[in-house]
Amino acid sequence: MGPSGSEAERRSLLVEEAGLSRWLRDGMCIALGGLATACHAMIAVRHIVRLGLRDLTVVGSAVGGLDVDLLIGAGCVRKVICPYVGAEALASIGPFYRAAAERGEIEVWECDEGQYYAGLQAAGQMLPFMPTRGGVGTSYPDVNSDLKLFPDPLRGETLVAVPAIAPDVALLHAAQADAYGNVQFVGTGYADRLLWRAADRTLVQVEKVVSNEEIRRAPERTALLAHGVLRAPFGAHPFSSPGFYLEDRAHIGELVEAGRALARRGDRGPFERYLDRYVRGPADHVAYLEAVGLRRLLALGEY
Amino acid sequence: MDAPSVKELMATFIARDITDGEEVFVGTNLPVIRAGALLAHLHHGPSMRVMVAHTRTNLHRTPVMEYFELLTDWRGARWAEAYFNDNEIVMYQKSRRDSVFFVGALQIDPFGNSNLIGLGRDPRRLTLRGPGAIATTTNASYVRRFYLFVNEHSPRVFVPRCDFVSTVGWGEGGADARRRLGLPGGGPRYCLTPLAVLDFEETSKRLRLHSVHPGVTVDEVKARTGFELLVPDRVPVTGFPDDDELDILRRRVDPQGLLRR
């Protein structure tokens, strides 16, 4: 109770979609959560393209998805930090990623998952680097000059020093949160907790915003504490969201084909049409979902 | 029943090499490896740790698990007993010392070192950008043993020297090669290809022909390997599944017939 007898209100962390702009700027280091074809923060990703941000360093997830590929295709990315960009069976490698990397248009910070996670762990623990053994005897220290072989000062063994990977902001997608940033997943949450620990700030899109009472029914499920929460039904589309919907394979196929047209034939037309239809055309997330269509969305159920 | 396909032979080879109690990941987009792991589990490995979609599962009494094409398909966790974050699985290797693992490759050298980074000389201008190592670099450093696996057996895959090495096999060669590098894991045991199974000669740790698949000749394998492959006096044909194994494969592991396409 304050001296006047009035109690201060607890601060809501709910963010409006238009307010995302305040979280994002050119040249930032942005971490994108989820894994492979699941749970990428696609409202935020499309917002970045709409803003026309440039020179981003993108820390994709450990099995980075086509969320990263879309940003590369749209010209937002200068550097990619993650061991993979693609969609497994739907695209063994992201077409924009492959083309831009082979042409030298983006810098790829070469690493495997162990090194990638070590860098994030170092950031979360506010350490300059983390040692790994994975990478000893390989080309990684040759192809990534940030990875340094060094003798363990205690036992003399040769190890790899991985510098801290410290995103300015982590953009995640989860099942639910309350207005105070208590985030709960359905499923494992991949490595989203680690991205939260490593980043300066974390914004989480959620399928639904729930009451604090609902969160307190199972507080052990609260995985991380967000700095901002965005209400985002179908917000991972065209990727899957555990407990809510599967990936939209037809839509992902459209994006992949647009990427391949550019990579293989130098034809940017299909991707420009994709951007017009789904990214730059729709003014906001609801307009995007309308462009995708209700019938398509409701056909994505898990069971 | 139809004669087993080469892919069914490879799955059977993998399954027979996995011991009950070991941990194995049921990968996605790799139907032969998935089938090998599940066949081991259903045939002789009821106490294996079978990992599906970041969960520990036990399918021993489950008649059929659907085929999930994608790593993150949460429906695969219906049989879950425990779940793990992706980063925990990669970072905490101590609890995985009884794990076996599979490594794909764009290139493999005579000592089983392999490359998923890409092809070319200048790492900033690769002529072919590979998929990347995913977690193979770290996992192959620690796991009990691993298997190399390629979908093409040709001189452009089996090369005298990889353009880049993303996963260490037997390094510069010799049985102590990995110990000298400080890598605690057991290293590669076999290399499976569409033509043959290769192993590693005990002293030099150079790749050696172990068995040829039905209809493949030793000379063909030698000609399609871009370095001198060690060849023993007698090379058997890769073993066939017995009736029990083939029944489990076709009825419970792969009813959709992916291994027969």
Image (spheres, rainbow, N blue to C red):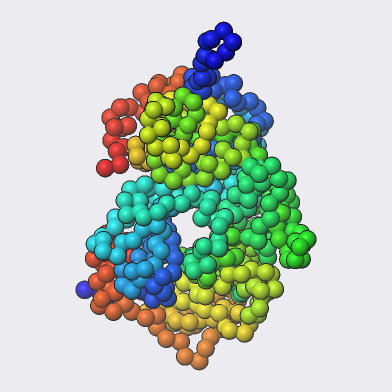
Q: Nearer the viewer, residue B50 or B253?
A: B50
Q: Position of residue B214 (x, y in %)?
A: 37, 79
Q: Nearer the viewer, residue B15 or A14?
A: A14
Q: Position of residue B118 (x, y in %)?
A: 60, 56
Q: Residue at x 57, y 55 (%)?
A: B91
Can residue A260 be seen here?
no
Q: Residue furthest left?
A: B1
Q: Residue at x 53, y 70 (%)?
A: B144
Q: Is residue B76 left or right of residue A29?
A: left
Q: Residue furthest top?
A: A4
Q: Residue at x 35, y 51 (%)?
A: B77
As displayed, is residue A124 above or below residue B197? above
Q: Is residue B78 left or right of residue B98?
A: left
Q: Nearer the viewer, residue B181 or B240?
A: B181
Can residue B230 be seen here?
yes
As displayed, is residue B30 above or below residue A55? below
Quarter of the image with the N terminus of chain B is bottom left
